[in-house]
Amino acid sequence: MVVKVWLATQDSAFQDRVLGKTQAELFRNGGLTPKDFANLQLDKNFRPLTLAEIKKIEPLGFDKAFKTAKPISDATFAESLRMAQMTANSTNKAQSMSFRKRNALGQKWVVANISKNVQQTLGAKTGEVWLSDDTLMKMVVHHPEQANMTLFSSVQRILDGATKVVKKDDLNVVYFSQQGKNYIVVVKATKDRKELYLTTIYQADEKEFYRQIKKATQ
């Protein structure tokens, strides 16, 4: 515990190096005392707790620490993507939901801004599109070959280059974009229209791409 008290006096870069970016965010912004944080590090058998296990004990701390979306360039994203890829190795699509429930921490990152026209179509109060760690994990399980930093860093370019944008229903719009490859992207508004989330992004072959356009426009 004494170490955690001392760590609280150090700068954020040092805290990030010692704890890892995600734990450091919880340490700084979760509303926990150094003692509380120290008590969350080990179980009764002195086994280090995972972040998902810590969240079960201290969910409000995670809600507070990760209430605000970080930019996609923030180190928490690269860390979360890497951890998702490591832990999803033995997970298949049928196990996707349970995997996400066990491991999602409530983190989110800003991946794009939609146009005013699409924002008005959805009746959204924001144009900022967030990617949740739940969707990140879904992508890693369902499209492991595509879920990489390059794809997620390219969301703005893919949306901007869309050849067709279709309102799927009251809350969802589907972007069909051909930026060297065929991309299908879904952006969803929350019911109160205060938040927008990227819920699907993947590369499709030409047959699938045009099949989905036909389906969306029928």
Image: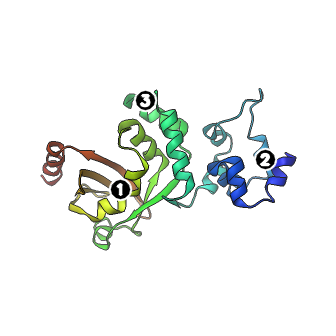
Tag of residue 95: 3
Q: Position of residue 145 (x, y in %)?
A: 36, 39
Q: Is label 1 in a helix, a strand or a loop?
A: strand
Residue at 68% of width from left, 40% of height from top?
A: 57
Residue at 55% of width from left, 47% of height from top?
A: 79
Q: Position of residue 25 (x, y in %)?
A: 65, 54
Q: Is residue 190 visible?
A: no
Residue at 46% of width from left, 26% of height from top?
A: 90
Q: Is label 2 in a helix, a strand or a loop?
A: helix
Position of 25 relative to 128 (above/below): above
Relative depth, front residue between 157 and 167: 157
Crowding near the residue tagged with mark 2, few <14, some 14–19, many ≥20 C-alpha atoms within 10 Å? some
Position of 181 relative to 118 (above/below): above
> In the rendered structure, are the residues bearing label 3 and label 2 in contact, judged by CB atoms less than 8 Å apart?
no
Distance of mark 2 from mark 1, alpha carbons? 37 Å
* Among the two numbered marks 1 and 3 on one chain, the one whose residue lies closer to the N terminus: 3
Q: Is residue 2 left or right of residue 72?
A: right
Q: Which residue is mark 1?
A: 188
Q: Name the mark nearer the viewer: 1 or 3.
A: 3
Relative depth, front residue between 216 and 177: 177
Q: Position of residue 180 (x, y in %)?
A: 23, 54
Amino acid tagged 3: Gln
Q: Is label 3 in a helix, a strand or a loop?
A: helix
Tag of residue 36: 2
* Among the two numbered marks 2 and 1 on one chain, the one whose residue lies closer to the N terminus: 2
Q: Residue furthest right?
A: 2
